[in-house]
Amino acid sequence: MKVLVIGRGGREHAIVRQFARASAVEQVYAAPGNDGMEAEAELIAIDEMDFNALADFAEANDISFTFVGPEQPLAEGIVDFFNEKGLSIFGPSKAAAQIEGSKAFAKELMKKYNIPTAAYETFTEAAPAISFIREKGAPIVVKADGLAAGKGVVVAMTEGEAIAAVNDMLEDAKFGSSGSKVVIEEFLAGEEFSFMSFVQAGKIYPMPISQDHKRAYDGDRGPNTGGMGAYSPVPQIPESVINETFERIVKPTVEAMEKEGVPFNGILYAGIILTDQGPKVIEFNARFGDPETQVVLPRMTSDFAEFMQAILNGSAYSLEWDEQAILGVVVASEGYPGTVEKGHLLPELAHLQGLEIIHAGTKKGDEGFIGNGGRVLLVSAAGKSIQDAQENVYKQLKQLQWDHFFYRSDIGWRAK
């Protein structure tokens, strides 16, 4: 098989690596990819949003199927575009991708089909939104309705923070049109986890769960980021809760989308919180999570490409997973998730022995890899337990000088 992976970040590098390890694959292409993927994929200089060029490449190079990593091309309809040209592609249609592209769409769907989630209201004007915040009090959650690269959610611990978030989104257009509508939700307390599933033609193939750390600094402090690290499995979440999440959330959501006339194919990501009333949905994504993908996919022992080809062809397939634990730590440029300086040299990565290194915001320089974005790398280790993996990865990270970069030193601290 020849496989095309669309995207350029850490999530896409993990996908590329899993395909490169598949015996069924002859060649992996990444468009546009990043310099750190070169050992595993041929990089194609086509932007993720250039649908015509991507489709032409897939056609000209006899690509078996295309796998879409990021949310933006999905939200803009790349799957519909490829399908119209008779090209095999994995992901949701533009209509189905609304489950991530519009928080309001997702909340209304959950309300209609009794899928457990936080109570909420939707607003397009600041004044009524601020009145609602004052009425409900804090803590409270403010979300930009549209896509905001993982940064459009504010968990406000005070009314002032919540009001500032509303003003940022509705008055100052901090997130452009993505923030022209906001969803304000009740704050839910509990243990969070990510439940991702492959979905194709109504069949659901759940993956092992994971937990990521969104806050920038140790102790879950600082601003929300796209994710500073993750681990899988999540020992503090019992199997009974995983089963309940599948039966009460994942399965009913796939069925609800079908009933609404927008059947969902692709990766359904459910961000879940385990409350006193059971598991509830925080958010849905229409693609793999980043950095969860980097710790979940390597646990797959089945041939990834063989599995993808089977489900795209409508064949049954039994997915198998390793019992090992994987923990990954994100290395980010100083200043992330705010303004960062690019071009700083990373330490010699070859010193990290026996660890997986996933490239996100890196570029090849004259003396080695340099930082070229906010989140730069994810470094992961496997172990018999989360604690084993954690010790392994931190022992080695601490031996290198990370000038101009930082990482959290407590990824996995919630694992019991």
Image (cartoon, rainbow, N blue to C red):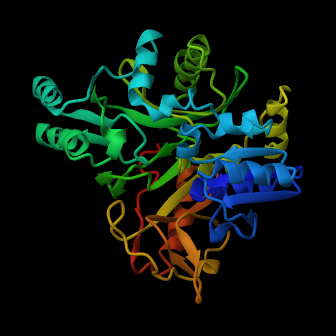
How far across and how far down the image is residue 339, in percent? 33, 66
Residue 49 rendering spot, x and y as whole percentages? 59, 51
Q: Residue at x 36, y 34 (%)?
A: 145
Closest to the observer, 124 or 28 = 124
User: Relative to the observer, which residue lies in front, 70 or 398?
Assistant: 70
Left or right position of 117 against 28? left
The residue sitting at 42% across, 51% down in the picture is 413
Residue 305 sits above or below residue 352 on the image: above
Give the percent coordinates (x, y) of residue 171: 19, 42
The structure residue drawn at horizontal position 74% and vertical position 48%, both measured from the top left corner, is 55
Between 416 and 410, the one lying in front of the other is: 410
Query: Does residue 189 appear in this view?
Result: yes
**Does 340 sit above or below residue 383?**
below
Relative image position of residue 349 (x, y in whole percent)? 60, 77
Residue that appears at 79% across and 50% down:
58
User: Is residue 324 in view from this perspective?
Assistant: no
Q: How many marks?
A: 0
